[in-house]
Structures are given as C-alpha cells and as structure tokens.
Image (spheres, grey):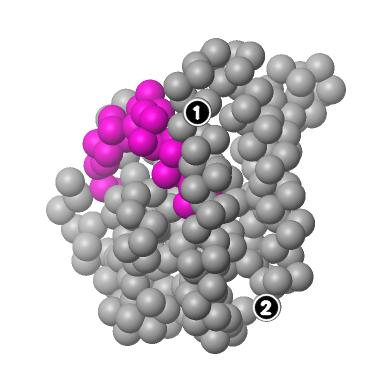
Amino acid sequence: VLERDCVSKLVKVFEEKSDIGALQPVIVNPDGSLFYGFDVGLGNYAKPIRRPRSYPLSETFFASGAALMTPSRIFFKVGMFDEALFLYHDDLDYSWRVRLAGYKVYTLVTAYAYHLGNIAHKHKSLTYLYYTQRNNIVTLFKNSKSTWLISRLFLMFLEFLTAFLLHYTVVERSPEKLKAIIKGLFAGLLLVSKWKDKRAEISGLRKTNEAEIIGALNKLVDISILFPKTLRRFLSIELDI
C-alpha cells in the first residue's frame, strides 16, 4: 500500500537526477517501525537501515523489492531480476548490478509504502533461511570482482559460523533451522558453476570500480555479526548500526 503521492514523488526524483538507478520509499512495517533500505557488509549479509543518513535522499546499498522504482532503460540494460534466484536477494542482486553499471541507489525519505511482507518470514521459516543462505553465495559470486571474491567468501563463512551455526546450535537450539541453513549453503556452492555465464555478462556492465563498491559496503555489518551484542558489551564496542 502506497501513500497517495508516493509514485509521483519517486518519478520526480528520476526526472531531476540522471545518476540514480533504483529508488525506494521509506518502508513502514506492520509494527510501525521504519526502514530506509539495506546496508550490506563485505561478507554480503544485509541489515535494514533504521534511520536516514541524509535528506531527502538517503543512500542505501540496495533498495527493497517490496517497493522499488527503476527506469525501464536501466532495468533492461542491467538484466532485470534474476529469476533463477527464485526467492529473496533478487533485489540485492539487482541493486548491485545497478551500481556496477554506474548508478546510485537511494531511499526517498519523504515517500512511504506500507509493507506486510515481513509477516511471511517473521519467525525465519525454513524456506526463508534456505534461500537467503543459498542466494547469498550466488549473489556474491555473480557480482564480486575476482580479486575480492575469495576474501569475501572467506568472511562470509566466518559470519556464517557466528551468526547461524553458533546461534542455532547454542542459543536457539533449532536443528531444523540449522539443517535448512546448511542445505542452503551447500546448494549455493553447487550452483556457483551455473552462474559463470551471468558473471561474464555482469563483468561487461562494469563502469564502477571495485573501490567504490567497497566504499558503499558497511563494514559495521560485519563487526556486528562477528561480535554478537553480548560480546560487544564485554569488549566495550559500540556500533552506530
């Protein structure tokens, strides 16, 4: 559900700025909380942005597919959504390609959309855990430059051990969820070879150097995953995330 003038506000931004490739309104969740797109760490795990960084446009690494506007010329140029991902991370994958093609991704903080989709994975269903883990690897493989791919995969595995393996073994003790995550991990690794052609196509899109991509990634996401809240309190680590 969009507020009455949400679409016109988004369109106006594209009319005024040619360097934006994807744009979302502020997402209003069922509990009234707001988020302004997503931060992504070097390990490719994402966290919602809870407050704007600037006004009226707040940069985000990727725009939520729940309410995303993008010019059709860019949509077809960068390859549309990847249907092979099937579920989850298709918006991350798309926004990453938009960035590689030389465009920016923003949230318009004066426009709002009401999103009930979080209900579907509120309790992190087995389907949600499987596909987010699988597509995390695939998205990383498709869009990372070769010089950074191995180090990002290594960091992703470290974060996997901390955020998922340890959590569902020690904290939540949910063997079903742990099994879904591990299955997703192996499924992603097995699918990597099938995305070689798409990886080559994406390389042809590159107008943005990897240093700019790294600059847009939020390293605090990685720190928050590698050092859980309890450990951060003990080490007196404060994060603005």
Q: Which mark is residue 209?
A: 2
Residue 222: x percent and y percent? 69, 42
Under circle 1, the secondary element is helix
Residue 166 position by quadrant: top right
Residue bearing the label numbered 1: 179
Under circle 2, the secondary element is loop
Task: Determine the residue positioned at 68% across, 30% down.
Answer: 162
Q: Is residue 207 left or right of residue 34?
A: right
Residue 209: x percent and y percent? 67, 78
Task: Say if 203 sits above or below 153 in the image.
Answer: below
Magenta extent:
109-138
**Direction right: furthest residue:** 235
> Is 114 colored magenta in this rendering?
yes
> Is 43 colored magenta in this rendering?
no
Q: Is residue 95 left or right of residue 207?
A: left
Task: Determine the residue positioned at 76% across, 57% down.
Answer: 151
Amino acid tagged 2 = Asn
Task: Say if 33 sits above or below 58 in the image.
Answer: above
- 166 vs 28, nearest the viewer: 166
Regarding residue 154, the answer to whether it shows in the image is: yes
CA distance for labels 1 and 2: 37 Å
- 222 vs 115, nearest the viewer: 222
Q: How many marks?
A: 2
Residue 5: x percent and y percent? 19, 58
Task: Say if 140 sits above or below 196 in the image.
Answer: above
- 40 vs 110, nearest the viewer: 40
Residue 29: x percent and y percent? 32, 35
Task: Say if 15 sits above or below 157 in the image.
Answer: below
Q: Earlier in the sequence, mark 1 or mark 2?
A: 1
